[in-house]
Image (spheres, rainbow, N blue to C red):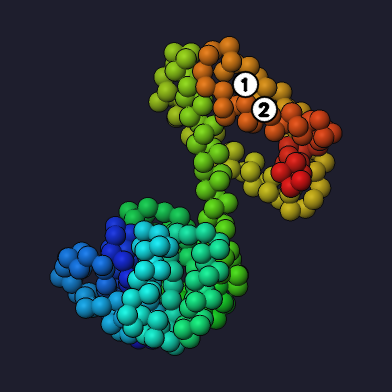
Amino acid sequence: MGNKQITVLGLGSMGQTLVRLFLDKGYEVTVWNRTAGKADALAARGAVAARSAADAVRASPVAVMCVYDYRAADAILAMEGVAAALDGRLLVQLTTGSPQDAREAEAWAHRQGASYLEGAIQAAPDQMGQPDTPILVSGAEAAFRAAEPLLQVLGGGIVYLGGKASAAAAMDLATLSTIYGTLLGFLHGARVAEHEGFDVAEYGRIVAGIMPTFAGFLQHEGGVIQSGDFAISQSPMRISIEATQRILQTAQQAGINTEFPAFAAGLFKRADAAGLGGEEVAALIKLLRS
């Protein structure tokens, strides 16, 4: 895209950050926000504040949208003239939603004659624009290739997940599952720390130290699942069956909340009953599939 023109719809903290990054790289940036006042500081830096969402879309070949949720995104796209303005343009949707949201949004965009990309930013506003800023992207490859230079402005860690528009949202949810699973376990550990009277900040430091090794372990287990070969390679299931029972028993004895360890120990106990104890720990996925 030789003419460096871009439209940004939505000027929350992330949207404002995107605009500043584009301005810094010499783009002509047109902005629009439901609350017009949010555009003032950006206009002072050289952005053009459009009077309507439709005017904003018409101003550039590419419109990047980043708003609170899909309900807000749909409301903007339903505004007068927006659908017609999208004809022949590319809509890059960076609003977080579900895989189904993405499928419906792509179908809608195509009906308006627009190209469509779904993106998931896996970083906070102050982490944007770095060589390793992770952004997941999915949608038609031609649209991705056209948008790649402007996506690189926002972050260098771009992962293109293929032509299914839903892929970025699905991968975002999958990675969030890891985050929340880890967080719940961490918080249960913090209760163990409190009960035993040791420093929770020190516990946090120790956990941070083991995380790189743990990340490598998870990567290995992902390969095991993809291969379908669950012969023991790093961690026998039996170790986890015993360990999760031990965490549960300790919580019961200490009188602290047992919800997390009861859930974990229950899953591993069922895996044991299903005869998976002599396989790699990733074989637990066989239980989750059934």
Relative to 133, does residue 231 appear above or below in the rendering? above
Relative to 162, does residue 174 appear above or below in the rendering? above
Can residue 179 be seen at all in this image of the molecule? yes
Work out whether residue 199 or residue 95 is closer to the camera in this orientation and state it: 95
Image quadrant in which you'd find residue 73 = bottom left
**Residue pictured at 40% horizontal, 59% vertical:** 69
**Residue pictured at 50% horizontal, 31% vertical:** 186
**Residue pictured at 47% horizontal, 15% vertical:** 195
Relative side of 264 to 273, left or right: left
Can residue 234 be seen at all in this image of the molecule? no
Rendered location of residue 232, percent (x, y):
80, 38
- Identify the mark at residue 248; answer none if there is no mark: 1
Between the residue at mark 1 and the residue at mark 2, the CA separation in whole angstroms equals: 7 Å
Rendered location of residue 140, percent (x, y):
56, 77
Work out whether residue 83 or residue 150 is closer to the camera in this orientation and state it: 83
Which element type, helix, strand or loop, lies under badge 1?
A: helix
